[in-house]
Image (spheres, helix red, strand yellow):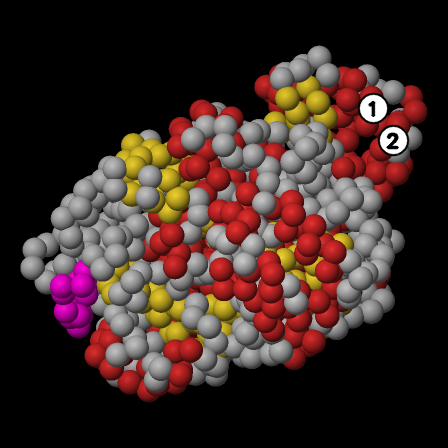
C-alpha cells in the first residue's frame, strides 16, 4: 500500500501551535521537513519533559525530518527560497508579519514558487483587532465559548483537558492545506491560506452555531447566562467497579432501558419516548437507573446494554486506557521509541487505509538532522541519517531503515537520495506550474459523494465536501430517519439539519430492499466517494463492502467510521461521542481536581466534529493520491482513536510515570499564575496564564507591582509554581472589580496571555470575528429565521467562501437524481410505488394529486 500523500513535499516552520498539522500530513505519506532556527524550536523544551525528551514535541513531530536555517541571515533566507522551489506546501506559525518583515513572507516566496500552497497558522489570524494577541489553549477555550459551557452550575467554569485544541487546529490546517493543494493540481495555481486558531475552535470544536447532537432536543433553545446542569444530558452512574455513562437518544434505546428497569408504570406513558420528556423527569428516572446499576460491574453493564440496545460505556482512567486490550489489539496504542533511548506506549495515529494504519513510523528528528545535505529538485531533499528505533504492537515505527513490506515507501538509498517516504513528483512542476483547469471553480467541483452518514459526525464530514463544490447526495430512509431530523422541536426542520446539510442534495432510498441496493450500485458506479458511519460490518451485510464496490468502480474511495473501529474486543460496542470520550480518558480528566464524581464534559459532543474533520482530511488525501494511482481505497477512522491522539501527551506521561497524571482543573501544572479568575459582574471570568519570565515581567507592570519582580519567591518559573496560591490571590484581587474583556485586552497588549470567557451570543458581535467575517447566515423555508453559521474553513486567496444553499428536506431531489441515472418516469414511479424511492412529502402529495386528476 502506498500512502496517499506519497510524493507531496511539505516545509514545516511551525513552533508549538500547528505542529500537529505537519504530523498528520506526514502520517498520510507526505515528506515533511521541519525548518528551525539554529538554536531549535521553543517547542523542543515544551513540558512535560521526561528524560530530556519533550513529550508533546516528540508526538507532534514524529515522521518528520529537520534542518536548521537562520532566517536572520541572507544565506538562510536564500536557502528557504530554494527549499520553497522544491515544495508543494509550506506551513508556518510565526507571529503575523514576522516572515514578511524578513523578506520571506508568502508574497515574496510565492513570487518565485507560484504553485506553492502557503498556510499561515496563527492564534487569531493575519488581520483583525486581536491579530497580535497570544493564543494559549486556556485563552482559546475561554474566548471561543467552550469554557462558558463547562463546569458545574454555580461553580467556576472548568477548562477542558490540555491538547484537544492544538490537535483540533492541526487537523483543520491540514484540511485547508490539502483543499488548496487539490485545487493546485487542477489549476497549477498555489494559494496563501490564513487559518485562525480562534475561529477554528469557535466553529470546529463543538460549535454553538453548528450541528448539534441529538441531546440538543432536551436543551433550552435560549442562552442562559449560567452553566446548565449538563449531568442529565449524558448521565454518569456509579457501579461496582467504577462508573458508566449512558447515551440514550433514540426511541428504541429508551424502550430497551424501560424494559431493563422492569417496565415501571410511572414511565409507561409514550411521552417518555422523547428526549425532552426524559430530561424533564431526570430527578425521578435517574435514581431508578442508579439503583439498577449499583450492583453490577462496568463489563456487565456494557454487555447487557449492548444486548438490549442501550448505549453504555465505562468511564476509564488513563491507567485503564493504557491497559485496555482493545486499544492494543486494534493498534490504536503502540509501544515505540519516541526519543533517544526513551520508549513508551503512544497513540499510533488517526486512520487506516486498506487495513493498515497510517501513523507513527519514525521518532521526531534531532535538531539539524539533515543540515549537511543540499536541496535536490524532483526527488527527496536530504539523505537519511543513521538513527534507529523500533515499535511493537502491529505498527512499524522508529526506523529510518527500509520501510516494512506493504507500507508503499521506497527504501532509503545512499548519497543524496530519499527520506524513505517516496520521491515521486506530484505531477505539477513546482516552479512553473501549468494551469489545467478553471481557476475560479470550487476546488472539489466535479466530485460526487454518496453520503450515508448520520447524526453529527455524518453531517459534518460530508458538509466539508459540499461546501467546497462536491455534489454530495445524502441518502436517507424515511422509515429510519437520521437522528438530526428527529431532534427538531415543533418545527418542520431542525436547526442542526440546516447547519449540517447545507449545499447537499437528498435522495430518499430504502437500502433494506434489493431494488434499493440496485439503485445505490448504479450511483456508486460513477461516484468518487462513499461515506458511512455505521456499526462495523453494516455495509458488508448490505452487500456493499469495499471489495464489492471496488469491483464495480475501482476508483471509488470508501470511508467507514465507527466509535471503536472494526477490530478489537470493542468493535461491536454502541458508541456516541460522550461514550467515546468516557472510554478514552477524556471525561476522567474533565473534572474538578477535588471531586472525582463530578464529570463536567456533559454539554459537548466532542469528538464528533473533529473526528469528522480527521476523516475529511483522510478522504481528501486519498483523492489526491488517486490522481497518481488511478485507484480508490478503503479508509477507516475510529472516533476513539481521535480522542487518544488528542490526549497523547497525558497518556505517554502516565505510561512513563504511572499515577502522576491527574485532573489539573484550571491550574496549568507548568505555569503560574494560571487559572480562571472571577471578574466584576454576574458569573464573569477571565483566564490568565504566565509561562515565562518575559510574561511575568509584563504582568508585574500591568499590576503596577514592581516589588513582585524582586521577590525571590517568584524569581523563576519553578519558584512561581511553588508559590502558586499567593500569585493566584494577587491576580484574583486585581481582576475582581474589572470588566473581563477590558482586563484581557490590557493584559494582551502588554504581552500576557489572557482571555475573557465569552458566551455564545457574544461571539456573534465579537469585534474580531466581525472584522474577519467569520459568520455567515443560512436560510431555510422551514425555519422561522436565518441562523448564524461558519462562513469558511479558512481564508484563502484563491478559493471563494462556500455558498449557503439551503439544506434539502428528506427526499427532495429523488426524482432529479434518478433521472440523472437514466431512469424514465415509469421506472421512477414504480419504485416510488414500491417504497424503494422516497421523494419528499411535497413531491409525494403532488404525485397523488396528478394521479387523481
- In magenta segment, residue 220: no
> Distance between the Cα atoms at labels 1 and 2?
7 Å
Tell me if 452 is positioned left or right of 389 in this view: right
Residue closest to the eye, 752 or 784: 752
Instruction: Spot the residue most to the left.
Output: 415
Residue bearing the label numbered 2: 283
- Residue 320 horizontal/vertical position (percent): 51, 26
Q: Tell me what residue is drawn at x 81 percent, y 27 percent.
A: 286
Q: Tell me what residue is drawn at x 39 percent, y 74 percent.
A: 118
Residue closest to the eye, 258 or 234: 234
- Residue 564 horizontal/vertical position (percent): 51, 36
Task: Judge whether 169 appears above or below 565 on screen.
Answer: below
Q: Which residues are magenta?
A: 370-382
Tell me whether circle 1 and circle 2 mark residues in contact (CB < 8 Å): yes
Residue bearing the label numbered 1: 287
Residue 132 in view (yes/no) = yes
- In magenta segment, residue 371: yes
Tell me if 122 is positioned left or right of 11 in this view: right
Label 1, residues with CA under 10 Å away: few <14, some 14-19, many ≥20: few
Amino acid at each position: 500500500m502506498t500512502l496517499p500523500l506519497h510524493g507531496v513535499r511539505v516545509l514545516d516552520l511551525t513552533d508549538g501551535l500547528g505542529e500537529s498539522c505537519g504530523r498528520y500530513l506526514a502520517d498520510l505519506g507526505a515528506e515533511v521537513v521541519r525548518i528551525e532556527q539554529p538554536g531549535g524550536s521553543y517547542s523542543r523544551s515544551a513540558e512535560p519533559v521526561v528524560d530530556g525528551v519533550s513529550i508533546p514535541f516528540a508526538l507532534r513531530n514524529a515522521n518528520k525530518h529537520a534542518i536548521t536555517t537562520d532566517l536572520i541571515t541572507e544565506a538562510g533566507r536564500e536557502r528557504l527560497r530554494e527549499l520553497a522551489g522544491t515544495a508543494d506546501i509550506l506551513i508556518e506559525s510565526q507571529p503575523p508579519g514576522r516572515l514578511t518583515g524578513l523578506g520571506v513572507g508568502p508574497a515574496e516566496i510565492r513570487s518565485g514558487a507560484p504553485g506553492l500552497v502557503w498556510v499561515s497558522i496563527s492564534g487569531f489570524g493575519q488581520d483583525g483587532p486581536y491579530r497580535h494577541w497570544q493564543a494559549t489553549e486556556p485563552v482559546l477555550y475561554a474566548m471561543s465559548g467552550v469554557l462558558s459551557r463547562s463546569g458545574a452550575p454555580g461553580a467556576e467554569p472548568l477548562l477542558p483537558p490540555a491538547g484537544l485544541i492544538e490537535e483540533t487546529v492541526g487537523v483543520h490546517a491540514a484540511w485547508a492545506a490539502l483543499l488548496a493543494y487539490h485545487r493546485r493540481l487542477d489549476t497549477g495555481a498555489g494559494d496563501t491560506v490564513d487559518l485562525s486558531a480562534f475561529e477554528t475552535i469557535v466553529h470546529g470544536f463543538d460549535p454553538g452555531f453548528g450541528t448539534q447532537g441529538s441531546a440538543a432536543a432536551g436543551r433550552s433553545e435560549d442562552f442562559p447566562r449560567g452553566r446548565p446542569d449538563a449531568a442529565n444530558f449524558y448521565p454518569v452512574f456509579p457501579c461496582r467497579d467504577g462508573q458508566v455513562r449512558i447515551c440514550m437518544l433514540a426511541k428504541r434505546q429508551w424502550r430497551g432501558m424501560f424494559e431493563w428497569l422492569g417496565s415501571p408504570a410511572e414511565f409507561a406513558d409514550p411521552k417518555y419516548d422523547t428526549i425532552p420528556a426524559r430530561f424533564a423527569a431526570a430527578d425521578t428516572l435517574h435514581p431508578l437507573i442508579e439503583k439498577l446499576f449499583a450492583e453490577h460491574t462496568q463489563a456487565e453493564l456494557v454487555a447487557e446494554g449492548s444486548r438490549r440496545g442501550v448505549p453504555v460505556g465505562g468511564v476509564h482512567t488513563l491507567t485503564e486506557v493504557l491497559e485496555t486490550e482493545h486499544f492494543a489489539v486494534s493498534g490504536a496504542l503502540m509501544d515505540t521509541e519516541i526519543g533517544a533511548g526513551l520508549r513508551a506506549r503512544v497513540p499510533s495515529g488517526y486512520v487506516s487505509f486498506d487495513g493498515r494504519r497510517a501513523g507513527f513510523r519514525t521518532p521526531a528528528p534531532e535538531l539539524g538532522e539533515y543540515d549537511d545535505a543540499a536541496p535536490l529538485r524532483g526527488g527527496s531533499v536530504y539523505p537519511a541519517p543513521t538513527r534507529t528505533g523500533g515499535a511493537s504492537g502491529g505498527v512499524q515505527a522508529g526506523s529510518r531503515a527500509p520501510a516494512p513490506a506493504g507500507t508503499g515507501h521506497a527504501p532509503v538509498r545512499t548519497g543524496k537520495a530519499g527520506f524513505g517516504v517516496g520521491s515521486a513528483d506530484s505531477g505539477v512542476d513546482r516552479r512553473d506550474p501549468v494551469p489545467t483547469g478553471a481557476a475560479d471553480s470550487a476546488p472539489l467541483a466535479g466530485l460526487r459523494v454518496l453520503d450515508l452518514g448520520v447524526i453529527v459526525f455524518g453531517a459534518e464530514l460530508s458538509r466539508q465536501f459540499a461546501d467546497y463544490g462536491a455534489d454530495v447526495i445524502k441518502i436517507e430512509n424515511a422509515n429510519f430517519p437520521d437522528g438530526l431530523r428527529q431532534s427538531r422541536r415543533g418545527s418542520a426542520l431542525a436547526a442542526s439539519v440546516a447547519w449540517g446539510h447545507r449545499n447537499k442534495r437528498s435522495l430518499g432510498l430504502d437500502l433494506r430492499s434489493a431494488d434499493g441496493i440496485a439503485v445505490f450500485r448504479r450511483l456508486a458506479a460513477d461516484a468518487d466517494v462513499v461515506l458511512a458511519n455505521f456499526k462495523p460490518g453494516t455495509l458488508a451485510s448490505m452487500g456493499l463492502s469495499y471489495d464489492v464496490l471496488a469491483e464495480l468502480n475501482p476508483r471509488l474511495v470508501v470511508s467507514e467510521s465507527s466509535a471503536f473501529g472494526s477490530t478489537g474486543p470493542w468493535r461491536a460496542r454502541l458508541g456516541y461521542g460522550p461514550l467515546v470520550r468516557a472510554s478514552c480518558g477524556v471525561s476522567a480528566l474533565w473534572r474538578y481536581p477535588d471531586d472525582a464524581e463530578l464529570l463536567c464534559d456533559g454539554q459537548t459532543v466532542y469528538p464528533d466534529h473533529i473526528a469528522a474533520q480527521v476523516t475529511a482530511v483522510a478522504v481528501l488525501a486519498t483523492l489526491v493520491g488517486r490522481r497518481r494511482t488511478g485507484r480508490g481505497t478503503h479508509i477507516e477512522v475510529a472516533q476513539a482513536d481521535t480522542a487518544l491522539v488528542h490526549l497523547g501527551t497525558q497518556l505517554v506521561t502516565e505510561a512513563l510515570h504511572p499515577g502522576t497524571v491527574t485532573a489539573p482543573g484550571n491550574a496549568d501544572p507548568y505555569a503560574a499564575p494560571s487559572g480562571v479568575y472571577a471578574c466584576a459582574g454576574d458569573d464573569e471570568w477571565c483566564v490568565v496564564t504566565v509561562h515565562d519570565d518575559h510574561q511575568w515581567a509584563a504582568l508585574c507592570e500591568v499590576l503596577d507591582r514592581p516589588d513582585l519582580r524582586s521577590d525571590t519567591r517568584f524569581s523563576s518559573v519553578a519558584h512561581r509554581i511553588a508559590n502558586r496560591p499567593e500569585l493566584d490571590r494577587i491576580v484574583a484581587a486585581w481582576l475582581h472589580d474589572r470588566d473581563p474583556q477590558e482586563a484581557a485586552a490590557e493584559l494582551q497588549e502588554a504581552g500576557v496571555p489572557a482571555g475573557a470567557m465569552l458566551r455564545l451570543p457574544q461571539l456573534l458581535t465579537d469585534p474580531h470575528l466581525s472584522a474577519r467575517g467569520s459568520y455567515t447566515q443560512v436560510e431555510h423555508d422551514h425555519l422561522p429565521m436565518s441562523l448564524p453559521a461558519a462562513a469558511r474553513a479558512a481564508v484563502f486567496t484563491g478559493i471563494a467562501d462556500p455558498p449557503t444553499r439551503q439544506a434539502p428536506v428528506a427526499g427532495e431531489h429523488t426524482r432529479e437524481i434518478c433521472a440523472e441515472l437514466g431512469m424514465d418516469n415509469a421506472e421512477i414511479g414504480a419504485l416510488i410505488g414500491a417504497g424503494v424511492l422516497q421523494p419528499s412529502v411535497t413531491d409525494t402529495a403532488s404525485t397523488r394529486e396528478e394521479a387523481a386528476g
